[in-house]
Image: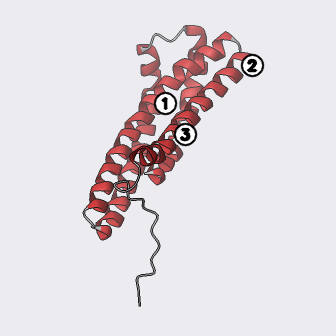
C-alpha cells in the first residue's frame, strides 16, 4: 500500500520564483492589512463616537497592544524558519513535535505578556505621556486589546 497521508506543505524551491514568492508573501500581507484595517476602524469609531479623546485613546492604546503583539509575531516568524528547516531536511516527525512545543510556549507567552501588559499598562501610558483627558479611555482600550491577545497569538501560531 502507498502512503495515503495528505500534506498541506508547498515546496517553494520548485517552479516560478516570482509566483512562489507572491504565494508565500500574500498571507503575511493580508494578515498585516487586516491588522491595519482593524486599527483604522477602531480610530474611526473612537473618533466619531468619543471625539478627539477617543481618537487619542485608540492611537496611544493601540501602540501598547501592538508592541506586545509584534513580540509574538517575531517568535512565530522564527518558528516558521525552524519548521522550514525541518521540512527541508525531511524530518516530518520533528515538525509535529516542534509545532506542539511552539504552540505551548507561545500560548504561555501570550498569557504572561497579557498579565504583564495589564499590570504595567498605566506605567506604559505614563511613559508615553498620554494626555490626562484621554488616559482612562486609553487604559480601557489597551486592556481590551491585551485581553484578546491570546487569540491573536493563536491565529498567528496556526498561520505558521
Residue 4 point in image, percent of width and height: 45, 81
Residue 36 point in image, percent of width and height: 56, 29
User: Sequence order check: which comes first, mark 2 or mark 1?
Assistant: 2
- Number of other residues with Cα within 10 Å of mark 2, as a class: few under 14, some 14 to 19, many 20 or more: few
> In the figure, is residue 109 to the left or right of 137?
left
Looking at the image, which is closer to me, 30 or 137?
30
| Residue drawn at the location 66% of the way across and 27% of the way down | 41
Q: CA distance from mark 2 to mark 3?
A: 28 Å
Q: Secondary structure at mark 1?
A: helix
- Number of other residues with Cα within 10 Å of mark 1, as a class: few under 14, some 14 to 19, many 20 or more: many
Residue 157 point in image, percent of width and height: 44, 51
Per the image, the residue denoted by label 1 is 65
Q: Secondary structure at mark 2?
A: helix
Q: Secondary structure at mark 3?
A: helix
The numbered disc on residue 13 is none
Nearer the camera: disc 3 or disc 1: 3
Using the rendered view, name the quadrant where residue 9 is placed. bottom left
Q: CA distance from mark 2 to mark 1?
A: 21 Å
Given contact means CB atoms under 8 Å apart, are the residues at marks 2 and 1 in contact? no
| Residue drawn at the location 59% of the way across and 26% of the way down | 140
Residue 120 point in image, percent of width and height: 42, 27
Per the image, the residue denoted by label 3 is 30
User: Sequence order check: which comes first, mark 3 or mark 1?
Assistant: 3
Nearer the camera: disc 2 or disc 3: 3
| Quarter of the figure with the N terminus | bottom left
Looking at the image, which is closer to me, 137 or 13?
13
| Residue drawn at the location 37% of the way across and 59% of the way down | 99
Residue 9's place in the image compared with 60, above or below, is: below
Picture mark count: 3
Residue 50's place in the image compared with 40, above or below, is: above
Per the image, the residue denoted by label 2 is 49
Amino acid at each position: 500500500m502507498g502512503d495515503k497521508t495528505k500534506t498541506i506543505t508547498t515546496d517553494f524551491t520548485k517552479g516560478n520564483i516570482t509566483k512562489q514568492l507572491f504565494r508565500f508573501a500574500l498571507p503575511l500581507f493580508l494578515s498585516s492589512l487586516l491588522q491595519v484595517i482593524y486599527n483604522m476602524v477602531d480610530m474611526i469609531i473612537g473618533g466619531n463616537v468619543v471625539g478627539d479623546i477617543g481618537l487619542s485613546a485608540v492611537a496611544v492604546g493601540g501602540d501598547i497592544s501592538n508592541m506586545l503583539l509584534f513580540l509574538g509575531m517575531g517568535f512565530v516568524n522564527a518558528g516558521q524558519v525552524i519548521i522550514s528547516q525541518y521540512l527541508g531536511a525531511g524530518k516530518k516527525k520533528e515538525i509535529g513535535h516542534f509545532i506542539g512545543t511552539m504552540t505551548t510556549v507561545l500560548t504561555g507567552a501570550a498569557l504572561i505578556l497579557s498579565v504583564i501588559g495589564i499590570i504595567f499598562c498605566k506605567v506604559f501610558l505614563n511613559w508615553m505621556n498620554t494626555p490626562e483627558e484621554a488616559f482612562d479611555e486609553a487604559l480601557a482600550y489597551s486592556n481590551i486589546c491585551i485581553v484578546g491577545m491570546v487569540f491573536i497569538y493563536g491565529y498567528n501560531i496556526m498561520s505558521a
